[in-house]
Amino acid sequence: MFDKAIQNPVGENNQYDAKRYKGVLQLVKEKAKWQGLSDKRGVAAYFCHNTYVAHVVEANHLSETPIAQHVTTAVDCGVVVNKDAAKNMVEGAVIDGIGNAIYGEMTFTDGKPDKENFHSYKMIRMPESPTSIEVHFVENEEKPTGLGEPPFPPVFAALANALYKKEHKRFYHQPFTKK
């Protein structure tokens, strides 16, 4: 997938390293035992803050609410100083991302938010959270890079891709529960 970008990079100063991008996809494929396009799970990868992240999400659409059952994640953020804390950051980003994909919507009327507090802004609840999240880090000697933001955005796409595989319906806009 990234072989062409590795062999023939476009431009003089690429922001990302195609070998590292390929590395997280290979690791998540291996750890999730992902079968590729025929697999009924969704996959997505992302690069920001010099960090590479890939998720494989297994999901079902139960009644009106999508449920992400299992998430496997691979991260290349350079040397991981505190693996427990890093794993917790990734797990939090996964849960928050899934919650935002399912419920995240902020509307305004006359410049004022329609949802002003947690009683009117729905957030993901424990029963809606994945039953398991596996986090795997690429082992390397690269300088440590960002980890707070990078795992968050690609989980939206991985969940949308998983739901597409199950229902053959694309989810382009959040919240995914909106009709």
Image (tube, rainbow, N blue to C red):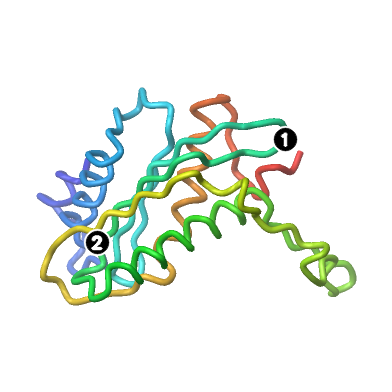
Q: Secondary structure at mark 2?
A: strand
Q: Position of residue 168 (x, y in %)?
A: 55, 25
Q: Position of residue 156 (x, y in %)?
A: 52, 50
Q: CA distance from mark 2 to mark 1?
A: 35 Å
Q: Which residue has dot 1 on it?
A: 64
- Quarter of the image containing the N terminus? top left
Task: Say which quarter of the image contains residue 52.
Answer: bottom left
Q: Position of residue 67 (x, y in %)?
A: 58, 39
Query: In front here: 108 or 95?
Result: 95
Name which of mark 2 and mark 1 comes first in the sequence. Answer: 1
Q: Amino acid at mark 2?
A: Asp
Q: Amino acid at mark 1?
A: Glu
Horizontally, is 131 left or right of 86 in the view?
right
Q: How many neighbours does mark 2 have within 10 angstroms: few (below 14), some (14-19), or many (20 or more)?
A: many
Q: Residue at x 59, y 43 (%)?
A: 172
**Residue 127 circle label:** none
Q: Residue at x 77, y 62 (%)?
A: 121
Residue situated furthest right in the rendering? 110
Residue 51 vertical placement versus 60 (above, below): below
Q: Residue at x 44, y 69 (%)?
A: 149
Q: Which residue has dot 2 on it?
A: 76
